[in-house]
Amino acid sequence: MNNPNSMFARAMPILFGALFLIGLVAPFAVYPTFLMKVLCFGLFACAFNLLLGFAGLLSFGHAAFLGSAGYVCGMLVRDLGVTPELGILGGTLAAGALGWVFGVLAIRRTGIYFAMITLALSQMVYFVVLQWKATGGEDGLQGVPRGHLFGVIDLSNNLAMYYLVFAVFCIGFFIIYRAIHSPFGQILKAIRENEPRAMSLGYDVAKFKLLAFVLSAALAGMAGATKTLVFQLASLTDVHWHMSGEVVLMTLLGGLGTVLGPLVGAATIVSLQTELADSVGSWVTVIMGTIFVVCVLLFRRGIVGELQALIRRAGIR
């Protein structure tokens, strides 16, 4: 009888290879802008899942990293004229630095206290972005040029822009995958399962949690900076607390603590929002809330988690 876990391990390289090939040909079959939005939010959700799904830390402030990186990238590209790859890098580093500040202030708290501190800090970022004239206030940072990648490739071409976004997503996803399958990732899981035991084994729990927080924030920033280039806009929506709630929904719907779950959840939510926006208008928020309730009540493992459980049961039988 085959071990389901070993079956998953053997199948993952094949699955990743197939998904990579699908990603390469997808813009020829599906509208590239839609795909770019899915990839940006997919990376955002994967970054959040690294923190909640593997370290057990529920942050309600991740929109601050997505949005602040977008504004930094937009300012660098539009106002200073840097190339887009440097804009993405600058936004990623800025989000990582902001994540370090958040982490230092919040990481020694747990549970609802940790979540509320991250939410409060995120709201402070939202207030700064709203009041600072350089960010455009309620109008957002508009007219961000896509520019030329490495000064050569014109990103005003949607196909070229898609492959940049796809490359950024692949890099971010690879970093997350390697992190969770490394000794660092195993320590995070140990902290999630039993923090006092991890401390008794001699691990500096606060240090590992802070590293996870900073890495998650930086990757969320990478998604936000890339999103700003795609839509040529950084808006208040990206730093609003609603965005932090939305990424929680994406992660739970796809499968908390799974590798591909956040991407599936992001694709599902973005697809529903795109399809329902014109037909039901503001009722799309109610529909999203209903989906969240159904997810929590009926399939708590999420889409990917339930599929994995089904495969395991079939393998055991």
Image (tube, rainbow, N blue to C red):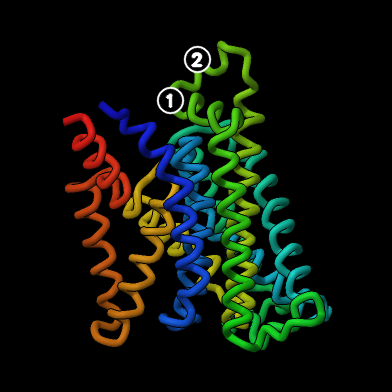
Residue with the mark numbered 2: 197
Could you tell me the amino acid type at mark 1?
Answer: Glu
- 140 over 207 or under it: above or below: below
Residue 150: x, y in percent?
Answer: 80, 75
Q: In this view, does 179 lie to the left or right of 114?
A: right
Residue 2: x, y in percent?
Answer: 29, 29
- 42 over 3 or under it: above or below: below
Identify the residue at image location x=30%, y=70%. 285
In this view, the residue in front, 156 or 77, is: 156
In this view, the residue in front, 229 or 213, is: 229
Residue 124 in sight: no
Which quadrant of the rendered structure holds the N terminus?
top left
- 158 over 187 or under it: above or below: below
Residues packed near mark 2 inside 10 Å, few (<14), some (14 to 19) or many (20 plus): few
Identify the residue at image location x=21%, y=29%. 316
> Do tag 2 and tag 1 residues touch (Cβ < 8 Å)?
yes
Residue 193, label in figure: 1
Identify the residue at image location x=48%, y=51%. 60
Residue 123: x, y in percent?
Answer: 55, 59
In this view, the residue in front, 301 or 260, is: 260
